[in-house]
Image (tube, grey):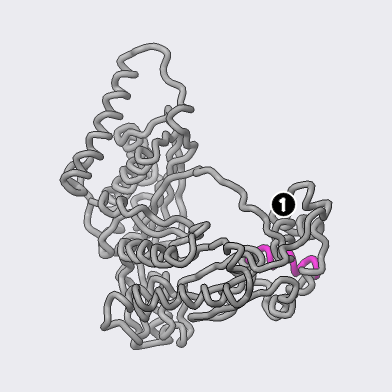
Amino acid sequence: MTSSANNNTFAPVGELKWLFFDLNSYFASVEQQDRPELRNKPIAIVPSNTDATCAIAASYEAKAYGIKTGTKIYEAKKLCPDLICVLARHDKYVEYHHRIFNEVEKHIPITKVCSVDEAACLLLSNERQPEQATALAHKIKAGLKANIGDYVRCSIGIAPNMFLAKTATDMQKPDGLVILHPHQYRAQLFALELRDLCGIGRNIEKRLNKAGIVTVEQFFNLSPKHARKIWGSVAGERFWYNLRGYDIPDQSTEKRVVGHSRVLDPEHRASDDAYNIARSLTIKACTRLRRHNMYAKRLSLGICTTQRTYWGAETTFSPTQDNFTISQSFCELWRRMQRDTRKATLLKVSINLHDLYKQQDVTRDLFDTPQTQSKLNKAELSQAMDILNKRFGAGAINLGSCPKTDAGFVGTKIAFTRVPEQVEFSEEI
């Protein structure tokens, strides 16, 4: 926190300032909008065709049976025998993401894209009265219905800061609209559970309970220093100020890792079959490095087996972004994994590139040596592969082959805070 916040030299925001929208059951809603045969039916979005996987989204019809994100499919089918499992189509969700956000921007500029289905909008000075803010929210909802479809709905929260506006979206779903008026929202907050607040997970809740805090009202009445002590970092103090309506700026972060992971289809879980998928994930990560003009110095490989054991290791190299150097390092890690796990049946593979640098921050070799020239040749060849694949289609040229997966895409998927670029789907083999 800044010293000005600690000295209480500024007050909580005294007006409505932020509008936050959250698309309801987004993946499932897109499927129901895009495929009429799924409308008004209980559906679960899954990463692969196996009952051992879990739902990554559920329609409201499925939620009525107690099915939610993370529910194992074999358990979900017991709760709802008529459940329809739908393979995730991340390319379709990104396509709808852009259509929806473009529609929202017809009514108000989007200040921050928080995830594929969430965004925050700073209200203009003439939009901060409750009547104007409410009218704006209704225009957004009407625009989505008219131009996207009846099955893509959103909950909107309006509040003095972004945190409270996001909290408001969770108070009424689906298709909700909740306003937390400045200095008048305590009763609405105090009716929530601690875990209802974004940023309080199981571990933080345990720490709060250990400190004698079991309600939102008790936390609200803490001192900011006490909140910081419970969290063990300044994040607790930031949380306290956000809860009280202060508009605390986001802390900027830099990209620290580029990677991909994949839950393997049952037919690809032998280590020899999984190798081709994992290598393809590695090449995709390299492609993303080059697109963002980044270099990496470290590669990590993580493996989860069907026996729920985990294997992980990493290796380092000189800063690079070429397919060949990083693929060679991947192959070395993969051979170590096969020796250590004795070719166990694999469930999930994860590839991550760490220690990222911008091109201008990479120290070049002082002398022109055969090794230096070899690096340049590999870099140029990797860039040539990008150009050919972009021109003639994904997989026009590749290092080896990759088996097709049930979901169609090997590594490109939507993460919690990352929306893939549309070009990433065209890079798939």
Residue positioned 30% across, 82% down in the render: 38
Q: Where residue 254 sits: x, y (%)?
A: 53, 43
Taking the image as shown, residue 374 lies to the left or right of residue 8, namely left
Q: Assign the magenta stretch its main secondary structure.
A: helix
**Camera-nearest residue between 164 and 361:** 164
Q: Amino acid at mark 1?
A: Ser
Residue situated in front as seen by the camera: 265 or 129 = 129
- Specify the farthest residue to the top: 367
User: Could you tell me if residue 73 is visible in this image?
Assistant: no
Q: Residue at the spot x=58%, y=62% of the render? A: 124
Identify the residue at image location x=48%, y=84%: 66
Count of numbered circles in the view: 1
Say which element carries label 1. loop
Q: Residue at x 80, y 52 (%)?
A: 6
Eyeballing the image, is 303 above or below 29?
A: above
Dividing the picture into quadrants, the one containing residue 25 is bottom left
Identify which residue, 148 or 366, lies in the foreground.
Answer: 148
Q: Residues within 10 Å of mark 1 (few under 14, many from 20)?
A: few
Q: Is residue 208 found inside the magenta-colored segment of the image?
A: yes
Q: Position of residue 385 (x, y in %)?
A: 23, 37
In x, y percent, where is residue 319? 43, 29
Residue located beneath label 1 in the image: 233
Residue 302 in view in this figure: yes
Q: Position of residue 51 (x, y in %)?
A: 35, 74
Q: Nearer the viewer, residue 259 or 255?
A: 255
Q: Is residue 100 above or below residue 190?
A: above
Q: Is-magenta flag for residue 329?
A: no
Q: Which residues are magenta?
A: 201-212
